[in-house]
Amino acid sequence: MCDNAAASPHGGVPHSGIITISWFGLSRRVFWPVTGAVYTPSAQGAHVVGQRIPPSFSAAPAVLLPQGLNKAADQLISQNTWTKPSGWNPRSGFPDTNEINDEMVMTGAGNVSVFVNMVFTGGTSFFGAEHGFRVLKNDVVVPSGTVTVSNTSASNSGTVPTFAVALADRVRIEAWQAGSGSSARTIDTATYFTATVV
């Protein structure tokens, strides 16, 4: 059965939002994207794409929830090239983080404030080389979303101006480093970013 779900071509399955699926006595909240993809939880509570859901589930209205991601491993990037960091883990305190392909997928519509803490392993090896980050929504840099500095600090952090998002919008960051040394161009695991609802 489906509670509070609009009719859809998927037999009552909602087009989007957060759904709770019951499967062999287990429950799991998963994001239901606007693409209409179908999820099936395994006996362990995981979900896969392309199969039917079990008959018992409930749907909640799509709500914009805060998200946070921590860099999972160090990553060497190319010099003078905007690069999408890969490999993230949900950040503590953000249980509703919905990460797909190294991007946050928004769970609803509203306004978000994105904070980025970009850290490189090189420390003082920068010698004033420019380094920074930028925030993108659906592959487009958000207004005033690029932050760069030229100093010897290993970190560059800041909050970009608040911007609007819609359900299933994708938000990600990219990194830039003008330093030539490999340590200067290595993104550290202390890197993280968050999207809070405002």
Image (cartoon, rainbow, N blue to C red):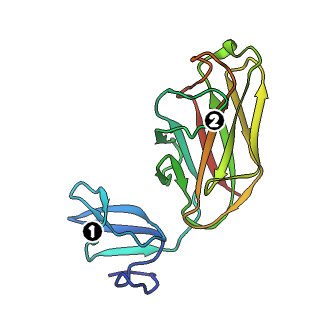
Amino acid carrying label 1: it is Gln
In the rendered image, the quadrant that contains the N terminus is: bottom left
**Label 2: how many residues lie within 10 Å, few (<14), some (14-19) or many (20+)?**
many
Quadrant showing the C terminus: bottom right
Relative placement, left or right, of 82 versus 31 is right
| Rendered location of residue 153, percent (x, y) | 72, 20
Residue ID for mark 1: 51
Residue 168 in which image quadrant: bottom right
Residue drawn at the location 23% of the way across and 59% of the way down: 42
Callout 1: helix, strand or loop? Answer: loop
Q: Whole-percent x and y of residue 138?
A: 61, 57
Q: Residue placed at 52% from the left, 74% from the top?
A: 61
Residue 97 image offset from top left, x and y in percent: 50, 52
Which residue of the protein is positioned furthest toward the bottom in this rendering? 7
> Type of residue at label 2?
Ala
**Which quadrant of the view contains residue 83?**
top right
Say above or below: 172 vs 74.
below
Question: Where is 75 relative to 111, above or below?
Answer: above
Real-space Cα distance between discs 2 and 1?
Answer: 37 Å
* Nearer to me, 41 or 185: 185
